[in-house]
Image (cartoon, helix red, strand yellow):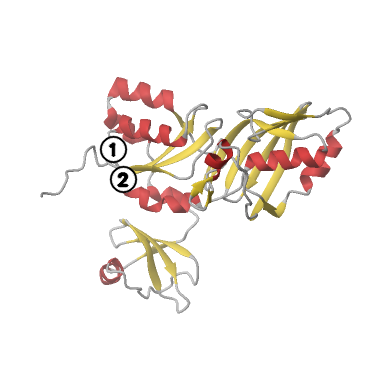
Amino acid sequence: MGRRRKQGREVNGILLLDKPSGISSNHALQRVKRLYGAQKAGHTGSLDPLATGLLPLCLGYTTKFSAFLLDADKRYRVRVRLGETTETADAEGEVIATAPVDGITEARVLEVISHFIGEIEQLPPMYSAVKHEGQRLYKLAREGKEVERAARQITIHRLDLLEMALPDIVLDVHCTKGTYVRTLAEDIGKQLGCGGHVSALRRTGVGPYIEGETDFVTMAELEAQAEAQGPESLDTLLLPLETTLGHCPAVRLSANSAFYLSQGQPVLVPQAPTEGLVRLYDVSDRFLGVGEILDDGRVQPKRLV
């Protein structure tokens, strides 16, 4: 049998999609992949269907590097409805408890949220994609089952109160990967003594890409441009992979070093950094991938284009 021919165009780059509410991250990914006519595409960590905002999509060889964005810090703007606890900790779930919010002051809210800043433990919600004995928690939850979950350690770098108009508060969250904003909102509501859930959520940043500093592209803009100018015109909206790794120092390799490194061998590079990850380039300034500095100072290939 001959090799199966790949369908679609070879397109490489990162699209900063402004995901609309009401669709899953995978649905958004497949729509974008079809618009580009791309051979290969993947996302860098899903957003709840309710949520809007930044969903970085990797096309072509950049899918190999999606873990760098998956592991990156995230930023959110979240509207929390106090006084109502829902089954799913967001607006899609049935309200299961209510409580008055009278007497909750801005000072009290600021005091409570201050306790969530820093390293904290968080219990993944039942309505999540975490697996328990091979089953997604949300599937078990839909069957009315609740199982024990191990708490995870996360870090909330910043937690700012942006607005307060009871029963709603709006928070700005800067956190590490794996943080469940729904759980954070629910826990804040519990600490305030009234309960709470996420009524609106927007992801405003992933790693180096932050709303207001970087342009996001809406699905409507993509569809309009593809129809008016063709799928190839969408390539101008893609960012190069190196923008994801801007925080990593650049290391340029000689022809010999580039050859050995491409074979998976660590190489010694004069004046290279002494630790951490580095961006790798050849003598013609072509991006090769990402390397890691070993204890002996050599550069080990970590992920190559």
Q: Amino acid at mark 1?
A: Ala
Quadrant housing the C terminus? bottom left
Residue type for callout 2: Gly
Q: Residues within 10 Å of mark 2 (few under 14, many from 20)?
A: some
Mark closer to the chain start, 2 or 1 = 1
Q: Which residue is mark 2?
A: 60
Q: Is residue 12 left or right of residue 270?
A: left
**Is residue 82 something one can see in this rendering?**
no
> Looking at the picture, how far across and down is residue 182, in whole percent?
64, 39
- For residue 91, what is the image quadrant? top right
- Give the Cα separation between the discs numbered 2 and 1: 7 Å
Q: Residue furthest right?
A: 103
Is 216 situated left or right of 252 in this image? right
The answer to whether any part of residue 42 appears in the image is yes
Where is residue 149 drawn, in percent x and y?
A: 62, 52
Residue linked to disc 1: 38
**Place of residue 125 in the rendered image (x, y in percent of width and height, measured from the top left):** 62, 43
Residue appearing at x 52%, y 40% in the figure = 139
Q: Secondary structure at mark 2?
A: helix
Looking at the rendered structure, the secondary structure element under dot 1 is loop
Q: Residue at x 46, y 61 (%)?
A: 249
Point 57% across, 50% down: residue = 177
Image marks 2 and 1: residues in contact by CB distance under 8 Å: yes
Q: Residues within 10 Å of mark 1 (few under 14, many from 20)?
A: many
Residue in front for this viewpoint, 86 or 243: 86
Which disc, if any, is residue 55? none
Closer-to-camera residue (99/25): 99
The answer to whether residue 223 is left or right of residue 152 is left
